[in-house]
């Protein structure tokens, strides 16, 4: 693997899942693979799981991991080609990225969207500029439109749980919109849709209120409905996530609390397991009764972030 910014960087999803689960069973199997190698984790935005799980994964492979909170500790970066830097930005990515590429064997970066300009966000300029100028493999720790380490984790978690359910059919996976107090990126939902569609081993339904359509480039292949109750019928896995509007970009039109998943709503499902990437706003996005019940896979999911990151980093190291 040369880089990891979307599912398109993966040749075989099931093989990558197998590799991750092998690391879960034997975390130090490749403890020398990353010996004398250094990984840089650059954060332009906050994180708990992504930051710590990637550090743990790197350490399991024998790498030295260095975290740099660019937003708080670094110079303000300029990403625009040809910018006249007379404003607040201090250092151009053209200058910063090649320097970082000298210090690290792999660079990982988290860079959220602005939610102000859809064209800019969906061009993924920030992460593409890093790739262009760093000269070393780049791993997305969540970019403007996608969160591939989360989605790999999600597929791992579903595949791990599937044998326990003994289904005689493909699993039904539902991605449902949930209320939130502020506009959030579409990254997790886009990415989950992209990975489930690419995996191709599920009946996939997306449900959301009117006007919360996601980009077709990620959802194509899924059944899309505004009827959440209908979507939940016979569901085996329900992935809960808020996202802001895509068409009239980055807005909250409505925050109908009726979209929050409850035990009562889940009654029509096939004893569905419930997933969320975390952090979650309890009793806004998801009810306590679900999060604290045996339905919830959220802690297992977050734990699996280590094995997803380890499988990706190992694949990159093995390619170098
Ligand atoms: N799910 C996820 O990416 O969590 P963090 O934002 O805490 O890294």
Image (cartoon, helix red, strand yellow):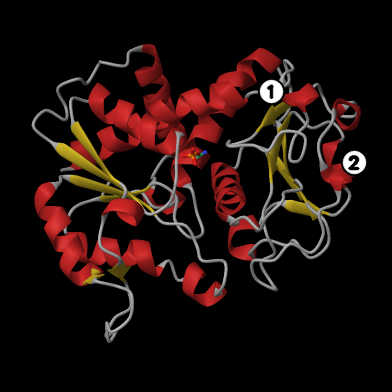
Determine the secondary structure under disc 2: helix
Indicate the position of residue 257 as horizontal and vertical percent values.
85, 45
Indicate the position of residue 50 as horizontal and vertical percent values.
42, 37
Q: Residue at x 70, y 31 (%)?
A: 170
Determine the secondary structure under disc 1: loop
Cβ atoms under marks 2 and 1 closer than 8 Å: no
Judge by depth and name the residue closer to the eye, 87 or 40. 87
Q: Nearer the viewer, mark 2 or mark 1?
A: 1
Whether ligand 1 has any atom under 8 Å from the Cβ at mark 1 is answered as: no
Which residue is tagged 2? 229
The answer to whether one can see residue 3 in this image is no
Q: Is residue 100 above or below residue 125?
A: above
Instruction: Find the distance from the CA under tag 2 to the CA under tag 1.
Output: 19 Å
What label sits on residue 296 in the rendered view?
A: 1
Category of crowding for the residue at label 2, using alpha-carbon neighbours closer than 10 angstroms: few (below 14), some (14–19), many (at least 20): some
Q: Is residue 128 left or right of residue 133?
A: right
Quadrant of the frame with the N terminus: top left
Q: Is residue 82 left or right of residue 117?
A: left
Q: Is residue 263 left or right of residue 294?
A: right
Which quadrant of the figure has residue 272? top right
Q: Residue at x 58, y 45 (%)?
A: 192
Which quadrant of the figure has residue 315? top left
Indicate the position of residue 203 as horizontal and vertical percent values.
72, 40
């Amino acid at each position: 693997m040369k880089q990891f910014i979307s599912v398109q960087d993966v040749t075989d999803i099931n093989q990558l899942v197998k590799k991750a689960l092998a690391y879960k069973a034997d975390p130090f199997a490749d403890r020398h693979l990353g010996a004398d190698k250094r990984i840089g984790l650059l954060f332009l935005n906050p994180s708990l799981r992504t930051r710590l799980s990637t550090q743990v994964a790197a350490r399991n492979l024998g790498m030295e991991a260095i975290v740099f909170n660019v937003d708080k500790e670094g110079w303000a970066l300029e990403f625009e080609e040809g910018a006249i830097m007379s404003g607040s930005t201090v250092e151009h990515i053209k200058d910063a990225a090649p320097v970082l590429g000298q210090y690290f064997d792999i660079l990982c970066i988290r860079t959220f969207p602005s939610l102000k300009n859809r064209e800019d966000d969906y061009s993924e300029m920030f992460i593409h500029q890093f790739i262009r100028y760093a000269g070393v493999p780049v791993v997305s720790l969540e970019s403007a439109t996608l969160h591939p380490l989360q989605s790999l984790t999600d597929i791992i978690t579903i595949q791990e749980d599937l044998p326990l359910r003994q289904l005689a059919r493909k699993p039904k996976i539902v991605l449902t919109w949930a209320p939130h107090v502020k506009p959030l990126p579409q990254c997790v939902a886009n990415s989950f849709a992209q990975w489930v569609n690419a995996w191709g081993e599920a009946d996939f339904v997306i449900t959301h209120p009117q006007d919360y359509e996601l980009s077709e480039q990620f959802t194509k292949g899924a059944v899309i409905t505004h009827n959440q109750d209908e979507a939940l019928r016979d569901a085996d896995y329900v992935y809960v996530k808020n996202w802001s509007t895509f068409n009239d970009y980055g807005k909250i039109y409505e925050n109908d609390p009726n979209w929050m998943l409850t035990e009562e709503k889940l009654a029509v499902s096939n004893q569905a397991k419930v997933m969320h990437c975390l952090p979650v706003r309890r009793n806004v996005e998801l009810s306590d009764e679900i999060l604290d019940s045996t339905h919830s896979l959220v802690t297992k999911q977050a734990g699996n972030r280590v094995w997803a990151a380890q499988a990706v980093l190992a694949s990159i190291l093995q390619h170098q």
